[in-house]
Amino acid sequence: MKTRDKGFSLIELMIVIAIIGILAAVAVPSYQSYVQKSHFAEIFSAASAAETAVAEYVMSNGGPNTANCTNVTFSYPATATVASAVIAADTSCVITVTGTTTAFGGTAPSVTFTPGTDSSNTGSIQWGCAATGTTNIPSTCQTPSSDFTPFTGGNTNG
């Protein structure tokens, strides 16, 4: 009686390796996209802190129609993902958050948050968002609606 060898044949092992290779080829780009989205979460976190600083300052100093962010006090420490977060020291009060090249694979994205009001002019601040330097712009970064009016300022006292 013949005994059968135990174990896997070479062709069976090659098929398993091919399947693992196909799965890895699909998983790696999805994983990289997920990692980049998580990095954008930190950029939006930095922007949120700056948005709060702008909103508090503007509302305490005459409202959106007299915005002047010359004296807004804000600092955000550089991290592995966020290189800088800056509020424009002028009547636009634009917030610019720049990512790091290492976190975003060689090209540092820059996300700009523009404060303004909508046509209802309720006094609440709306935020427009635009990103450059990336193809993976998050869905939360949207162009403002057509009735969006950026701050024009006018308060020169700051």
Image (tube, grey):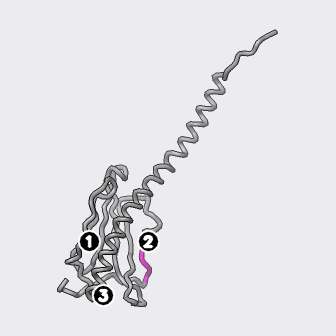
In the rendered view, tell whether residue 130 sits above or below residue 100.
below
First in sequence, mark 1 or 2: give its number. 1
The residue tagged 2 is 142
x and y percent of residue 60 in the render?
28, 85
In the image, taking residue 112 as reference, residue 7 lies left or right, namely: right
Q: CA distance from mark 3 to mark 2?
A: 24 Å
The residue positioned 27% from the left and 80% from the top of the image is 57
Q: CB of mark 3 within 8 Å of CB of mark 2?
A: no
Residue type for callout 3: Gly
Region of the chain picked out in magenta, as a range: 141-146
Q: Which mark is residue 63?
A: 3
Q: How would you classify the magenta stretch by its main secondary structure? A: loop
- Dot 1, crowdedness within 10 Å: few (<14), some or many (≥20)? many
In the depicted view, which residue is nearer to us: 5 or 49? 49
- Dot 2, crowdedness within 10 Å: few (<14), some or many (≥20)? some
Q: CB of mark 1 within 8 Å of CB of mark 2?
A: no
First in sequence, mark 3 or 1: give its number. 3
Residue type for callout 2: Gln
In the image, taking residue 68 as reference, residue 120 lies left or right, namely: right
The residue tagged 1 is 87
